[in-house]
Image (cartoon, helix red, strand yellow):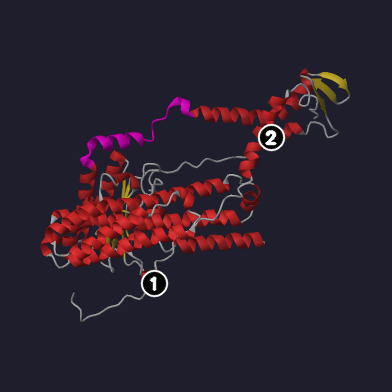
Amino acid sequence: MTARGFLAGSISSPVRAFLFLLVAAPLLAGCGYNTIPTNEERAKAAWSEVLNQYQRRADLIPNLVETVNAFAAQEREVLTAVVEARAQATSVQISPEMLSNPEALQAFQEGQANLTGALSRLLAVVESYPDLKSSQNFLALQAQLEGTENRIAVARRDYIEAVRVYNTSLRTFPSVIWANLWFTGNEPFATFTIDTDKMEVPKVDFNDNG
Amino acid sequence: MAALALLLLVAFAGSALAQSLPTLTGRVVDNAGIIDPASETALAARLEAFEGKSSDQIVVATISNLGGEAIEPYANRLFRAWGLGQAGEDNGILLLVAVEDRRMRIEVGYGLEGTLTDLHAKLIIENTMVPAFRAGDFSGGISQAVEDIILVLEGNAAELEARAERNSEDEGVWWEIIPFVLFFAVWGSLFFGSIFFAIFAPIFGRKIAPGRYRWLGVNVSYGGSGSSSGSRSSSSGSSWSSSSSSSFSGGGGSSGGGGASGSW
């Protein structure tokens, strides 16, 4: 069946360009042109979720400090440490455009790790105040804090996975072709590393009843 | 052959990975065997009725141990693997009990975090489950906890109805099929167009040479093998298997780690 003449004949050039696009768009998509931007946006969204959960934790802290202060004002040192760590942690902000900068992420991570440490010291101190521990307000805050810490863990895990997928797509066939041809500005994203203090073996001292 | 071996390898690897998580057999997955059969039946019926009303998927799972993992990541993994809650709505809840670890967790999907807050989950665990579990009454503790969860979810009645409305499956609107009709119109004209052309050209067209016809401005020539194109529409017998409604599966929801855990 010959269908020349029918196609090559009286078709104006805008229509031909449109037909070309009609054919080319799915072909480009099929070749993985969309892979890198899709993965990049997914990683950025995962990062926003990380920020969101850290912010949620930071928002809980003033209330927590207030509540502890009402029962245990003499623990001024621990309370100040939490407030300062919060101020320091929230001062480091990372926009999605800065994700390819490992140093920035490291600074962010250190700030948040400091806050985690200060918070856990505060919660340890609380153990010696039974009134505080059984107060409804503190129980509510504690439940929210625990939930937020867990959400942070989930968000971090999701971010690590999204970055792994994105970084892999920058380096593997066939998407690496597009990375070199078109997305030359795309850098691999930095990801979380295990905090150095978590790698130490926990110390158990039975003589200290703290 | 090599491809087949690779395929088998992938299949085995997949099943080996999935083996670490229990399979979703129903709304009550009692792998540790701590719920008595009567309560289990009643619980499953209760959960099914509640899902019918609200579209919220609550699943109770018990396991003997966590294999050294913390309960929070395990519960999140299980929740996502099962896909509890409706897709897009993420309104699932997983009540997980690890017997040997003496840990329990209520994992709440994204969509219910605002209704069943971490504090609610914590209170249900501390006030309902822990006392019953300490007394050794697993069935009672779990049943009562499920009642409490349902109570909290039902607390916001307007939102509950709105959610059920959004996720009712049997409501189809006629214009939802327009994309399918369009697709089959385009696909059909591409697929059958050439065949029809080959068939109709000799009938309606103008004969310009032996075996050559001109119809609608297109020259159609037939080769020696004659009308081969006419018999090409091989009917592939596609059998549609209707999914039975008795089996239970997650709706594709996800969880961001909301909820609370406790121990007894």
For the residue pair A172 and B122, the one nearer the viewer reads as A172
Q: Quadrant of residue A135?
A: bottom left
Question: Residue placed at 57% from the left, 47% from the top?
Answer: A35
Q: Position of residue B73 (x, y in %)?
A: 36, 60
Q: Quadrant of residue B170?
A: top left
Question: What's the CA distance linking mark 1 and mark 2?
Answer: 66 Å
Q: Assess disc 2: are there few (<14), some (14-19) or many (≥20) residues with their C-alpha within 10 Å of its C-alpha.
A: few
Q: Are marks 1 and 2 in contact (CB under 8 Å)?
A: no
Label 2 SS: loop
> Which part of the image, by quadrant, shows the C terminus of chain B?
bottom left
* Secondary structure predominantly adopted by residues drawn in magenta: helix
Residue B104 sits inside the magenta stretch? no
Report the residue marked by disc 2: B233
Q: Position of residue A69 (x, y in %)?
A: 15, 58
Residue B168 is at least partly visible in this image: yes
Q: Are marks 1 and 2 on the same chain?
A: no
Q: Position of residue B29 (x, y in %)?
A: 33, 57
Question: Residue placed at 22% from the left, 80% from the top?
Answer: A206
Identify whether A24 is placed above or below A125: above
Chain letter for mark 1, please: A
Q: Label 1 is placed on what type of residue?
A: Met
